[in-house]
Amino acid sequence: MIGDQNSEGLFLKQLKSRDEENIRQIRMEAAVHHVLHHFSEFEALKPFVPMYCGYDPRQHVLVTEYIHNTANVWELTEQREQLSASQAKCMAHILASFHLDLTNRLVDDPTLSFLDQKLPWVLNLPNAVNHAPEVVFQHIKQDEFLLYKLDEAAHSWRCASIIHGDVKLQNFIAQQEANELKLVDWEQANMGDPLWDLAGLLQSYVAGGLAYMTSTAGHYELPVSKAYWEREKVLEMWRLIWQEYSSKMRWTSELAEEAALKTVGYMAARLLQSAAELNRVRPEFMAPGTWSMIAEARSYFRQPHVYSRQFCSQTSTVHGE
């Protein structure tokens, strides 16, 4: 960071390790920032992302605006012990503002040729020869049902728009003195399926509660102190997000139903990713929250219609405005 807490500054991102994958990611991030800031279609997104200042392809340094005195939505939720309806709707609005169909430009626009349209790693897991030794990966690789469903989700993938690739509550930030959110950490960005981002946001609310699960004699439960993550409150956020996003995308009822089912499958895959991320602290041991996320993912894969209907049901009284 160049600057200080009380003034605008620049955020410099430079690779610690120049291996092939890290270089690919920072190039993708720079290319996506360029597209978002220079394509006129994305004008509505600009208030919701840090300003892009440039990229040095020789030193692999990405320069963006530095936003001081911020907290992310997960941190704000923990501080307030309350889920925010206004934040949920704002995050859905941000996603819809850049999920624009660019398929007709993919062939002819040289800017988009920099994007490699790579699948998220979890969807590649069924066909991966080598995988990390952590217990979560071992568990998935030994589970034929999960592998089949991940492969099924991978085959439904449609590269249509710019995607963030790692949408979750932790990647939406707000300055302490302002209510406006910004979406940050675009290092997984690429051309891809926009429903992957939507699924990431929806599952992030679920993962927020499951991460706190405790176990007593094999029974998993949410601590009383974390009651603001309980299922009914999460469902309220799901419905608000779905209503805001689907209205912005102007789906017909048929398209909305198809998108909802596909989103549930992606949510399951994203939950498996969240389980792996949660378990990195003790990779040889499966914590209660990790088991809960894997079980939740399995349930989504088994009953997609049950969960997709919960998006579209009538929203009840919402708290946290």
Image: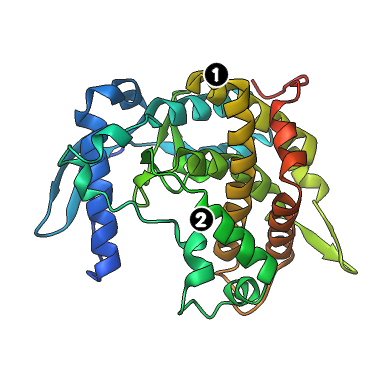
Nearer to us of marks 1 and 2 is 2
Quadrant containing the C terminus is top right
x and y percentages locating residue 169 in the rendered image:
53, 41
**Residue, disc 2:** 154
Q: Residue at x 67, y 72 (%)?
A: 143
Q: Residue at x 23, y 62 (%)?
A: 23
x and y percentages locating residue 22 in the rendered image:
28, 64
Q: Note whether residue 89 is visible.
A: yes
Residue situated in front as seen by the camera: 33 or 260 = 260
Label 1 close to label 2 by CB (< 8 Å): no
Q: Residue furthest right?
A: 217
x and y percentages locating residue 213 in the rendered image:
76, 57
The three-letter code of the residue at mark 1 reads Ser
x and y percentages locating residue 61 in the rendered image:
17, 54
Left-right relation of 212 to 162 = right
**Residue, disc 1:** 247
Q: Circle 2 sits in a helix, a strand or a loop, which is it? A: helix
Q: Residue at x 57, y 37 (%)?
A: 76
Residue situated in front as seen by the camera: 113 or 59 = 113
Q: Residue at x 82, y 46 (%)?
A: 224
